[in-house]
Amino acid sequence: MAQIAVIGGGPAGLMAAEVLSDAGHAVSVFEAMPTVARKFLMAGKSGLNITHADDHAAFISRFGAAADRMRPMLDAFTGADVRAWTERLGIETFVGSSGRVFPKAMKASPLLRAWLGRLDRQGVRVFVRHGWEGFDKTSLIFASPDGRQALSFDAVILALGGASWPRLGSDAAWVPWLTGRGVAVTPFRPANCGFETGWSTLFKEKFAGAPVKSVVATSDAGAVPGEFVISRHGIEGALVYAHAAALRDALDVHGAAALTLDLVPGRSVDRLAVDLARQPRKASFSNRMRKGAGLDAVKTALVRELVPDAPALAPDVLAARIKALDLPVTAPRPIAEAISSAGGVSWESVDDRLMLTALPGVFVCGEMLDWEAPTGGYLISGCLATGRAAARGAIDWLAGFVPR
């Protein structure tokens, strides 16, 4: 029986602890916060999206540039496997209309309680308020309620998260401790985040918090239907998050980026032009938009904001703008506000078992690794799959297994 430390008590770390303890190893989980899985619980407040019912090939494609590296782990723990695992914990799931998978209770807390109960029965020990502070030769250093501790283990799983939501524990404080040992870390950037725009004072004062419903937004990420929310700083919400990586990368490369919005996806531009032409020119712009295009107040205001001369445009020109309304963004919101982060431990720094090549016996999983995915269940699935893979890698390494 090996003594194994799992540092980080989020989904990736808890999954690693489950797999390791199920294999008969003695596992200690160290969590800096007063309780484990705080980000997991926060994500589940509005309905825990545990995975997605996408076709498996489509599911893997959601991991973008890291899809090839993530594929073996996602193949070994698919969305269907996540559902089966959840239901073995006694938590029934269902598939929503968008393909997202939720527990029937919709909350994260029942699943977490059942999960921690399983870990307890398997002998996993959980130490909270134990913040990892790096290495001292071959020991791990922890700041604990009993003072500074130096502990040694046969293997270590690092599951400390990325750089988003630092108040919940993912603060990337670990970066210098790994780079100082020769581990390459790609700088963190916000993912699944809102974006800043140049809203006028009048627009943001009147419409901040308003949803923009039933649109199709297009960027380099493709055309995605859905809705988003106007914020005081710009835009946010699930539809924006689906385009976040494309918008962020365009800003990095070109210094400019925009979402192209179709505000009336159910009508062709020609039909819309005819409907607008039927409206009396003496009618107010708001009434023409409401009766001719079916636009509500926030969509109408959005057209005015982005096309100042819209009221004077000919119906065919106005229809074309409504069907392809460019919404420029100027910057992503700060990473501390982002749902997740891009960047992390470089894939070149780990082997196929997720072991750090510079630190034999130390494995990395979850959002510490350099991958990103949109919201919709992909993030939690990715964390569970990499946690499981790191644990399997540690088991193989401890057994002296050398893959061909």
Image (cartoon, helix red, strand yellow):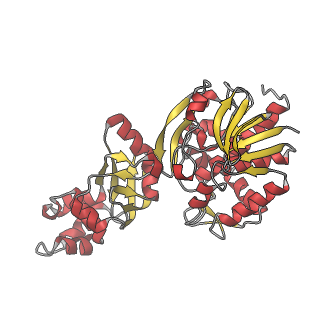
Q: Please state the horizontal and vertical placement of residue 374, each as a whole percent of the image.
A: 52, 50
Determine the image quadrant of residue 300: bottom left
Quarter holding the C terminus is top right
From the viewer's perspective, is residue 141 above or below residue 229? above
Q: Residue at x 37, y 37 (%)?
A: 252
Determine the image quadrant of residue 239: bottom left
Q: How many marks?
A: 0
Q: Residue at x 54, y 44 (%)?
A: 171
Q: Residue at x 61, y 60 (%)?
A: 41
Q: Nearer the viewer, residue 377 or 357?
A: 357
Judge from the rendering whether residue 164 lies leftward or rightward of residue 201; answer left or right: right
Quarter holding the N terminus is top right
Judge from the rendering whether residue 192 lies leftward or rightward of residue 127; answer left or right: left
Furthest residue toward left: 282
Q: Please state the horizontal and vertical placement of residue 135, each as a whole percent of the image.
A: 67, 31
From the viewer's perspective, is residue 330 above or below residue 393? below
Determine the image quadrant of residue 115: bottom right
Q: Nearer the viewer, residue 178 or 52?
A: 178
Q: Please state the horizontal and vertical placement of residue 216, each as a whole percent of the image.
A: 39, 58
- Does the rendering let one see residue 270? no
Judge from the rendering whether residue 281 lies leftward or rightward of residue 31; answer left or right: left
Q: Please state the horizontal and vertical placement of residue 385, each as a whole percent of the image.
A: 68, 46
Q: Residue at x 75, y 30 (%)?
A: 361
Q: Nearer the viewer, residue 205 or 86?
A: 205
